[in-house]
Image (cartoon, rainbow, N blue to C red):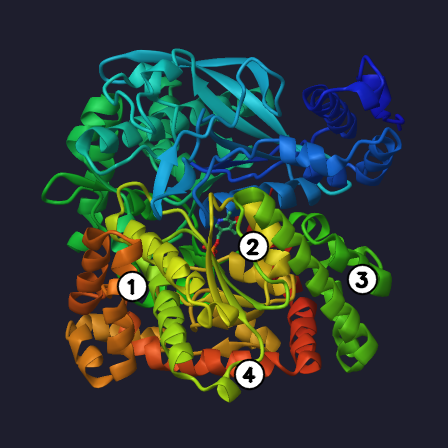
Amino acid sequence: MTEFSLASYANKPLAECTELELFNALLSLTKDAAAEKGYNQGKKRLYYISAEFLIGKLLSNNLINLGLYDQVRAELAEAGRDLAELEEFENEPSLGNGGLGRLAACFLDSCATLGLPASGVGLAYHCGLFRQSFDKNKQYESPDYWLRWGQESWMRRTPKHYTVNFGNLSVTSTMYQIDVTGYHSQCDTLNLFDVDTVDERVIKNRINFDKSQVAKNLTLFLYPDDSDEAGRILRVYQEYFMVSNAAQLMLDECVERGSNLHDLADYAAVQINDTHPTMVIPELIRLLGERGIGFDEAVQIVRDTCAYTNHTILAEALECWPLSFIERVAPQLVPIIQQLDAFVRGQYEDDFVQVIDQWQNVHMANIDIHFSHSVNGVAALHTKILEDSELAPFYKIYPEKFNNKTNGITFRRWMVECNPGLNKLVSGKIGEGWKTDAEQLEQLLPLADDPAFLAQLDQVKRTNKQTFAAWLAAHQGTVVDPDSVFDVQSKRLHEYKRQQLNLLWAIRKYQRLQMLEADELPKHKVTVIFGAKAAPAYTIAKDIIHAIICLGKVIEADPVASKYLQVVMIENYNVTAAQHLIPAADISEQISLASKEASGTSNMKFMLNGAITLGTMDGANVEIAELVGEDNIYTFGDSSDEVIARYKRGDYNPRSYYEKDEELAAAVDFLTSDAMLAQGDATNLNRLHDELLNKDWFMTFPDFADYCATKAQVLKDYEDREAWQRKALVNISKAGYFSSDRTIAQYEKDIWHLR
Ligand SMILES: *Cc1c(COP(=O)(O)O)cnc(C)c1O
């Protein structure tokens, strides 16, 4: 094996290099080291198609995976340079919104590590998701130019080009590749396509751009604003561009590996990550047809090749495109989709399962379910809800297709990289084996009765809180107290995730603090930390952000309350922020309305890093609760069955709760109090107040009292530090199940059969 020395990649002494020069040297070194490891190969290959790959920064991740981290850090230190400085210098590729994109990234890491030949396939967005800043206590969006085009980056231009024909124009693409390094293993690749005619100059102010110029704007942004028709059509253009490239790449590569296309399913497994890549099904049928394969056989080949992952039961998120959109974007697919529709119609009468409905809308998930061989949910409860209610008519037709694959996370990024203190403590006790065999973390369990070890765990958490506080102060000038309880809710902003419930709790806490006598005041201050971006067109979500920031200011200005309570909103929450924040968390808020969160993955990250979950029995929280036992998790609220029944009855009336519960009413009304209005905007605060009082579609009020009571218990239990650390230890020990290595091994065994 080659000795990789950073000095040999720089053309002057390391001490004299600019950050850019050092970063470029590190890029070259890492790429060479990855190439030397080689790539996972085999007859059959996975094509994981996804509109999002939220990969996070890659420098440290790659150095760790390649086994070069300590050596490179030492070499830098010797020259008086700090690896942390270069970690800061690197831009985060913001190629995803949240959990779904982060899952895709964790899956590629695990595929590479397990030696599975796999390619991620997606788009090379120039700006990805917007960058969030706060101005006048509101979210402000600007383009995030994560790539300095023309400069060195993780993306490698390849000579692969394809032509993609849209109804009214034809474009060519270029494929870029990013190495996916596995942990001490061979690599896989992430293939990202860009349109050759892309032109950043069509971006106007902020994230607005000329939506009509498809050839120029196609790969500029992840999910352009879909609040108007032009934005919605653009999304269909993006999706077709992505899958047409994916299908052409895959057929080419399979033929190169020896496939005669009739046997495609022996050469390729396609995983359709949510409905965005659905058009790969008709596109593959079309391309197989061009290559001489009849329709019926093509349908069978595609079904044997493709598998679909469902990520949500929120009705508004299940994509449904007017056929007229597809007619404009990819007219060549329309006759195929109509044939698929006719095929389904010939067999089943139920309107629910049809491909094209009576209004000429195409139901993308329905194409996926009929024409792939596997349909999986992402947590046990989620899959059960799919089978029993959301997709019940399909489950009746195809019980054998349905299966569960509970999500996971890669422990390399979410502990080894982001929590070096805990990594060292754990590895010092049980060795390094858990990094690729996560169940070994259970060997920590006996230490639950070892006060010395629990004290060390406490010390690691305390250090992480200090490190996070320093990062936050440097990052956005916000000062937090590491001696306070870090109570964290970080995830996309969505009403179903119920940041508003946490907000109402904080208001109530503030109101109580104002009434307490000095001898009743709490022992530890609570710092409620939110991190969340709201979709640019999601009005109420942005109102919630506004209210959170305003509340933070109200409390800050109160000389007494601010000693016991602080509310903080992290600016531009992304993977980098998550890696700083999660190791510092004491409490993990997972408070979605039961039945609405398919799985969640931040719940797993927090657990692995020793935070205690306060959550509803939703998504993978259910499995966390089963694993750690009721002493080591705090659950509250209505069950998914109760929630589903209440929706069915349609009799939920938030006002009835408001009228019965004085504390709830006072908290809700505080949103439009003089104190809040002095900080914020009446339009936004009134709208949020009215929305909660009149609609509260995600049923915050019924869970409010139980949430407050449970959280009071959590904070009380926090005071017994040893008992708390024992809970943390049990959580860490039992987190092994949530390694994405386990998830990927299950996909391989049950769905892909790559080996
Ligand atoms: C893990 C992760 C998520 C997903 O969080 P959930 O709580 O599962 O929704 C979102 N954003 C980032 C940056 C993450 O790392």
Q: Tag 4, which secondary structure?
A: helix
Mark 4 to mark 2 CA distance (whole Å): 25 Å
Mark 2: few/some/many CA within 10 Å (<14, 14-19, 20+): some
Q: Kindly identify the residue that appears in the image at 54 percent across and 27 percent down.
A: 191
Residue 425: give its label.
3
Q: Residue 167 falls in which quadrant of the image?
A: top left
Q: Kindly identify the residue that appears in the image at 53 percent across and 51 percent down.
A: 478
Amino acid carrying mark 3 in the image = Leu
- Specify whether 291 is left or right of 698: right
Residue 133 in sight in this render: yes
Q: Kindly identify the residue that appears in the image at 80 percent across and 19 percent down.
A: 16
Q: State which quarter of the image contains the C terminus.
A: top right
Q: Of the residues tagged 1 and 4, which is closer to the observer?
A: 1
Residue 675: give its label.
1
Q: State which quarter of the image contains the N terminus.
A: top right
Mark 3 to mark 1 CA distance (whole Å): 46 Å
Amino acid carrying mark 1 in the image = Ala
